Image (spheres, grey):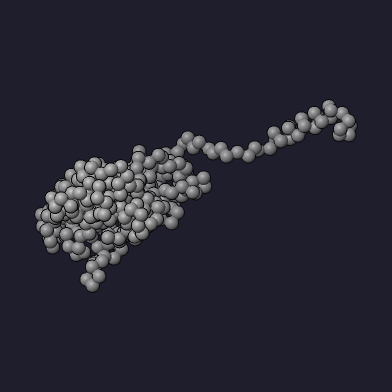
């Protein structure tokens, strides 16, 4: 063969030979299989890297699965719709593989505290947020309810107020709260007396509803009443601290007897809104929309601002007790979420 640099045809032949040799090797590519045979499923539970699913077209078939390697950086949560391949027979010992996550309609999020803008996705694709609170034992926390409402409106999820333990105290104040926001409210008893349970069943029918509430409000007891075979662990309230014990360690979605799903989530003592925008907080107070419309653009709604529509209403002396409490709650959320240029908080109120 002619030495390099003497015959241009030799260079051409060498490059041609190299092209042929390279073409026999498997090219490196990021292309993935299209998984045309994958079937759609709903995520109903997550436990240490294993996912409990039910097939969309065969909801009585429960499948266990792990995730494909290409999804290792993607969060998969209860409520997600996914595509799964492999063994989807649901037989004991079988394992499928999640290869795709469908686009989510919405997500319910919270942050660890009000200073943390990193959001934690709780569930996906929910229709309703069932806010479980107590009439007594432990005492109701209206400002925590305000946080739930803000998170629900931010996610595009319809809130429902469920007041438990109304055999211990009246639910009138909490029901008035819900009425002022134009959201449905139901009252439940623990002593077996007549209550709004049939109305609650009607509200949940054929919907995906996620139940939230701080420890001790009776959320797991409620889930067991809605789904008798669920057998969710229940706890008691500490008489000294007034706090409940966490009994649900992870979220789980359960089919309702009359259609729909109820997602039970772990009890929380805080609900951070560090990820929520200014406008989202304001939207969580629709009963104050008229007053908010009187504020100048960019108003922080702080108590010391003289041209704030909320402040003017308070200064006029015409605010009702309920309006004053709601204004105070909005101002607190603005401040505690770090939006009012002040130090953030833990998200507990």
Q: Residue furthest top?
A: 9
- Most foreground residue, 60 or 153: 153
221 with respect to 337 (left or right)? left
Could you say which quadrant of the image residue 170 lies in? bottom left
Q: Nearer the viewer, residue 218 or 144?
A: 144
Pinpoint residue 123: horizontal percent, then vertical percent. 35, 49
Residue 150 lies, in percent from the top left, at 28, 49
Determine the residue positioned at 17% across, 62% down: 136
Marker count (numbered): 0
Report the residue at 63% width, 39% height from top: 28
Q: Quadrant of the C terminus?
A: bottom left
- Residue at far bottom of view: 240
Apparent side of residue 190 relative to residue 280 in the rendered image (left or right) = left
Residue at the image position 76 percent from the left and 34 percent from the top: 18
| Percent x, y of residue 304 | 26, 54
Taking the image as shown, residue 175 lies to the left or right of residue 296, namely left
22 is higher (above) or lower (below) than 224? above
Residue 74 visible within the image: yes
| Residue at the limit of the structure toward the left, as seen here | 194
Please name the residue shown 46% across and 47% down the image.
74
């Amino acid at each position: 063969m002619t030495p390099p640099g003497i015959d241009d045809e030799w260079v051409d032949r060498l490059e041609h030979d190299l092209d042929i040799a390279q073409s026999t090797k498997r090219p490196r590519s990021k292309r993935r299989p299209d998984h045309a045979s994958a079937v759609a499923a709903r995520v109903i539970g997550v436990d240490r890297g294993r996912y409990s699913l039910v097939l969309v077209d065969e909801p009585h078939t429960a499948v266990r699965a792990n995730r494909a390697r290409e999804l290792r950086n993607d969060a998969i949560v209860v409520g997600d719709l996914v595509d799964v391949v492999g063994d989807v027979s649901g037989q004991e010992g079988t394992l499928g593989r999640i290869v795709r996550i469908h686009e989510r309609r919405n997500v319910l999020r919270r942050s660890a505290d009000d200073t943390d803008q990193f959001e934690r996705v709780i569930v996906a694709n929910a229709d309703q947020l069932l806010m479980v609170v107590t009439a007594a034992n432990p005492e109701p926390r209206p400002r925590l309810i305000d946080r739930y409402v803000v998170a629900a409106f931010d996610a595009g999820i319809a809130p429902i107020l469920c007041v438990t333990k109304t055999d211990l105290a009246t639910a009138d104040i909490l029901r008035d709260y819900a009425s002022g926001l134009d959201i449905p409210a139901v009252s439940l008893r623990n002593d077996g007396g007549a209550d709004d349970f049939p109305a609650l069943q009607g509200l949940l029918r054929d919907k995906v509803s996620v139940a939230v509430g701080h420890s001790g409000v009776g959320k797991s007891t409620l889930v067991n009443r809605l789904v008798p075979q669920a057998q969710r662990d229940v706890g008691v309230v500490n008489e000294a601290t007034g706090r409940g014990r966490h009994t649900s360690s992870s979220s789980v979605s359960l089919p309702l007897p009359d259609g729909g799903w109820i997602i039970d989530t772990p009890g929380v003592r805080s609900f951070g809104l560090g990820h929520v925008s200014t406008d989202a907080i304001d939207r969580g107070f629709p009963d104050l929309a008229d007053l908010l419309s009187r504020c100048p653009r960019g108003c922080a709604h702080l108590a010391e601002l003289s041209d704030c529509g909320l402040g003017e209403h308070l200064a006029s002396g015409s605010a009702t007790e309920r309006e004053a409490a709601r204004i105070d709650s909005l101002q607190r959320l603005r401040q505690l979420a770090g939006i009012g240029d002040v130090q953030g908080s833990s998200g507990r109120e």
